[in-house]
Image (cartoon, rainbow, N blue to C red):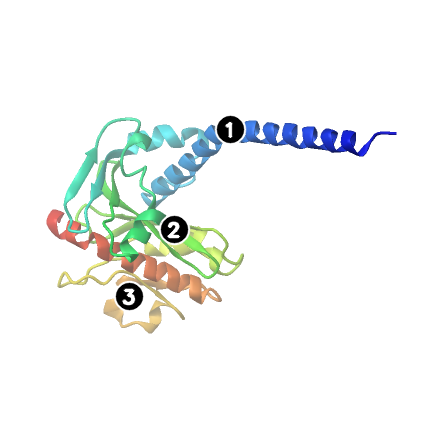
Amino acid sequence: MYSNGYIFRYAAILVIITAALLSMAAMLLKPFQERNRAIDKMQGILASAGLRDVEADNAISLFNKSIVEEEIVSPEGEIIDTYKGSPKENGPAFKVNLKTENYNKSKGKPYKLPLYIANVKGEKIYIIPMRGTGLWGPIWGNIALSEDFKTVKGVFFDHEGETPGLGAEITTDHFQKQFIGKSIFDDNGNFTSIQVVKGGIKALPAAAQKHGVDAISGGTITSKGVEQMLNETLKSYLPYIKKHS
């Protein structure tokens, strides 16, 4: 019959060994987890530029081939850092934490704006990362703009916990492809962003339909979250756009 002291020591040793093994496993897996997160980020950036369905095995090489430059932009539109080297995941834009920068912006603190410049089939494309709020949690993505910054070349959206079949539809090709060819400025050069319209863009005047897409049926709050994310993000880049268009 084992004493209470023996049982206690045995249990304590098991707990310590288990904790040590779990800690070691976490340390060993961390590089793989970080690599997977980086690949997911690359795939999202490439998807917004029209390079969709990129396999994980090809994502890094295609990202380094397609992204020719990274920039960090100030809220005043000045370029404060630029990177043309390789690998591109070592660049300053790729390392920016949008959650942190959005928090700084909300608190009136200095913040950084990451920007990617891509060459896709000989066309120069500017890719802007975004982060916002959906119904149940954060949403994020990228919007790719033409060289003159007027026309949307593509978008990519993802989420943490939106409702399957409703708000989660922001990840589908059906929703995202609507944005291609839309304009974020009107004919007079005024900023319009992109409206996500409940009931569809047919409710808009004909001239305004090029600045809107159909909202997700049953996903009104997520749709409005996408619209707000686009508007707030693009507004932050307007000083840069005005200086470089």
The amino acid on which the numbered mark 2 sits, given as a three-letter code, is: Trp
Mark 2 and mark 3 in contact? Answer it, CB < 8 Å.
no
Numbered disc in front, either 2 or 3:
2
Quadrant of the image occupied by residue 205 = bottom left
Q: Label 1: state its secondary structure.
A: helix
Q: Residue at x 48, y 31 (%)?
A: 30
The amino acid on which the numbered mark 1 sits, given as a three-letter code, is: Met
Q: Earlier in the sequence, mark 3 or mark 1?
A: 1
Q: Residues within 10 Å of mark 3 (few under 14, many from 20)?
A: some
Q: Residue at x 23, y 53 (%)?
A: 151
Q: Is residue 82 above or below residue 231?
A: above
Residue 152 at what x, y percent from top left? 27, 52
Mark 1 and mark 2 in contact? Answer it, CB < 8 Å.
no
Residue 235 at what x, y percent from top left? 23, 57
Q: Identify residue for label 2.
A: 140
Q: Nearer the viewer, residue 233 or 125?
A: 233
Q: Identify residue for label 1.
A: 27
Quadrant of the image occupied by residue 208 = bottom left
The amino acid on which the numbered mark 3 sits, given as a three-letter code, is: Gln
